[in-house]
Image (cartoon, rainbow, N blue to C red):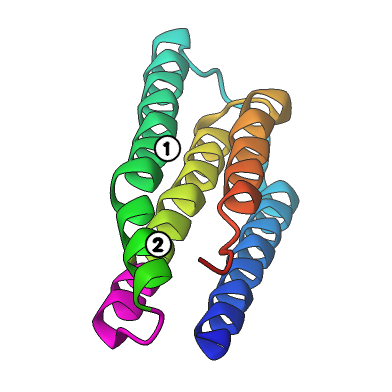
Amino acid sequence: MEATLKNLRIIQMALIGSLGLLVYLIERIHTAPAILKPAVLMVFIALAIYLTFSIISFRTRFLSRAEEKLRLQPTDAAALKKWRVLHIAIFGMCESLGLYGIVLREMGASFSQAAGFYAGAIVLMLLSTPRRP
């Protein structure tokens, strides 16, 4: 259990670091701003809201069940594997929120428009820190 928890936290920090690196790189290579249509921004905002609710739902539905199973049977290898996989899936969903911001930035959005996506991804990732069940 301790090794899995440590590995999940390493994965989490690596994903946060990779998102930071991607944001840095997109800001360095981003050239002259293009004009982004407001409808495109609204679509991405709607997708981000849906993704955020999906992450929260995923945590409450599936992850809580896996944590409860681990609480009752801490030595259950299948439950531990499911708990680990669910955390990695949540991390992937959080990371994709940050990638929405990177795509928007490349399409011509301003930094302030994309920053909400970056911040949302990091906040959700930190809120999803794995804890011992």
Residue farthest toward the left in the current orientation of the protein: 78
Classify residue 113 by image quadrant.
Answer: top right
Pointer 1: what residue? 56
The residue shown at (54%, 75%) is 8
**Residue under pointer 2:** 67
Amino acid type of disc 1?
Answer: Ile
Dot 1: within a 10 Å radius of its alpha carbon, few (fewer than 14), some, or many (20 or more) residues? some
* On screen, residue 22 above or below 84: above
Left or right: 115, with 5 as reference point:
right
Q: Which residues are magenta?
A: 74-85
Give the residue displayed 61% in from the left and 36% down from the top.
120
Closer to us: 60 or 119: 60
| Above or below, comparing residue 53 to residue 131 in the picture | above
Q: Does 105 sit left or right of 71 as displayed?
A: right
The residue lying toward the viewer, choosing from 64 and 122, is 64
The reply to whether dot 1 and dot 2 touch (C-beta < 8 Å) is no
Crowding at mark 2 (Cα within 10 Å: few <14, some 14-19, many 20+): some
Q: As shown in the figure, which amino acid type bears the numbered disc 2?
A: Glu
Q: Position of residue 78 (x, y in %)?
A: 24, 81
Depicted 130 relative to depicted 114: above or below: below
Q: What secondary structure prevails in the magenta region?
A: helix
Q: Is residue 84 magenta?
A: yes
Answer with mark 1 or mark 2, whichever residue precedes in sequence.
1
Name the side, left or right, on which 7 lies relative to 16: left
Query: Which one is in front, 17 or 35?
Result: 17
Q: Residue at x 33, y 45 (%)?
A: 58
Q: Secondary structure at mark 1?
A: helix
Q: Residue at x 37, y 87 (%)?
A: 75
Please provide percent x and percent y for residue 62: 29, 51
